[in-house]
Image (cartoon, rainbow, N blue to C red):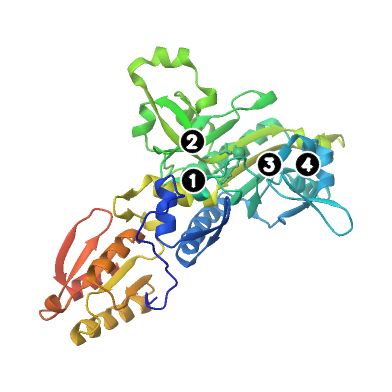
Amino acid sequence: MRLSKYFLPTLKENPGEAQVISHRLMLRAGMIRQSSAGIYSWLPLGLRVLKKIEAIVREEQNSMGNQEILMPTIQPADIWRKSGRYDDYGPEMLRIIDRHERDMLYGPTNEELVTEIFANSIRSYKDLPQLLYHIQWKFRDEIRPRFGVMRGREFLMKDAYSFDINSEEARCSYNKYFIAYLKTYASLGLKAIPMTADTGPIGGNMSHEFLIIADTGESEIACHRQYLEMDLSCQDIDYNQDLQPVIHRYTEKYAATDDKRDPAIEKALGDDVRTARGIEVGHIFYFGTKYSEKLGAKVSGPKGEEIAVEMGSYGIGVSRLVGAIIEASHDDKGIIWPKAVAPFKVGLINLNISDRDCTVACEKAYNDLDSAGIEVIYDDREARPGAKFADMDLIGLPWQLIVGPRGIKTGSVELKNRISGEREEISMESALTRLLD
Ligand code: ATP
Ligand code: MG
């Protein structure tokens, strides 16, 4: 991609409306533009990151044996009346009336719709378990949309649903999601701590939220200090093994979001307790037969008896993650993308496009990288070096390959690692070898 032709409207000044760093940086790096409160357009650079996160989330869902579907954004009100949530949901739900005066709504979540799909199609316990997910835009008319894409009104969520014959099987499904979430966050270059969450009337220990520690988090969390050092990446864990001991290992110590904190436990923990602010990036929840009873999701059991299926739902905030990653990874110059989600791997900077040697070397490097499938953005604009450096630091690509008229005379370039900050003067050849690695 040539920067001279790329739609990258960066801003020098901090936009006044943005309170948190990720929102400021996303606006300044030309990733998003607000359309109305809590509703954003994704520009080329932002969309690339969103798609990368989406792909990582999708890959792990597929690996755990989950099946992707795509449900619509607009849903009929009837199924929400059946579940009893049409009135309960309140003003967060965007209600719509179609031309035939039918009540519709823009889905804030999909339990009802997926349960109806299941109820119309699955009849026997032999067809269980079923795990289904989709990645779709949601709308919640949040009372206070803020922090950019982290608390939007329209946002992208991966939501999954499990259908099992009994509570033991449901727990197995739940455990798979738990592990899949930890693997997903690790692949994104993040550490998210599982914390006990509210289970409502069902009780037990079957709801967890996953939180990233960041100063701008909306939740004041507390956890055992061991979580901060623990390896939560679940790299060697296989979905077919007994996951219960693994889950136990990751949940036995104290970790709670603000509404679940327990002063007595924290007092007893003494020096071992850490408090911090956290951003919720995922939530898994086992709720039994709450929706299957009301929406008729029943199967026939081994003896022909009718059984309401045991369900759970599992969400990851895909668009929120874009902001959350920036909150966790930036410096005073801009974003520092973890490799896995960086919009491009390399930013190639031509310090003087009127210098023939410089431009010839850059064109060749650009073609070599591009044809090797390396994602490269080439700053071929007619602009001052200072402006080029500032933009490249702002958009935070893992590598910068800097080519200037003086160095190129002796064949040397500068390779800068945006993550470690290291800069090296090396030959163009070794720089390319490193980047092609
Ligand atoms: P919160 O407490 O932050 O409002 P929630 O409990 O309402 O979240 P869920 O219904 O569990 O959220 O949704 C699953 C995930 O979707 C959340 O973990 C979060 O990452 C994301 N999410 C929820 N609301 C928003 C929003 N307004 N903007 C962006 N992402 C959101
Ligand atoms: Mg909410």
Q: Is residue 292 left or right of residue 147?
A: right
Residue 309's tag is none
Q: Which residue is mark 2?
A: 218
Q: Nearer the viewer, mark 2 or mark 4?
A: 2
Q: Nearer the viewer, mark 4 or mark 1?
A: 1
**Ligand 1 under 8 Å from disc 4 Cβ:** no
**Ligand 2 under 8 Å from disc 3 Cβ:** yes
Q: CA gap, disc 2 to disc 1?
A: 10 Å
Q: Residues within 10 Å of mark 1 (few under 14, many from 20)?
A: many
Count of marks overlaid on the render: 4
Instruction: Give the residue drawn at x 88%, y 54%.
Output: 101
Q: CA gap, disc 4 to disc 3?
A: 36 Å
Q: Percent position (x, y) of residue 376?
A: 35, 71
Mark 3 element type: helix
Instruction: Give the residue drawn at x 76%, y 33%.
Output: 290
Q: Nearer the viewer, residue 396 or 419?
A: 396
Query: In the rendered image of this protein, does residue 81 appear above or below residue 106?
Result: above
Can residue 370 be seen in the rendering of this structure? yes
Q: Which residue is mark 4?
A: 125
The amino acid type found where label 1 is placed reads Phe
Mark nearer the N terminus (3 vs 2): 3
The amino acid type found where label 4 is placed reads Tyr
Mark 2–mark 1 contact, CB under 8 Å? yes
Q: CA gap, disc 4 to disc 1?
A: 45 Å
Mark nearer the N terminus (2 vs 4): 4
Q: Is residue 74 left or right of residue 188?
A: right
The amino acid type found where label 2 is placed reads Glu
Q: Which residue is mark 3?
A: 92
Mark 1 element type: loop
Q: Quadrant of the C terminus?
A: bottom left
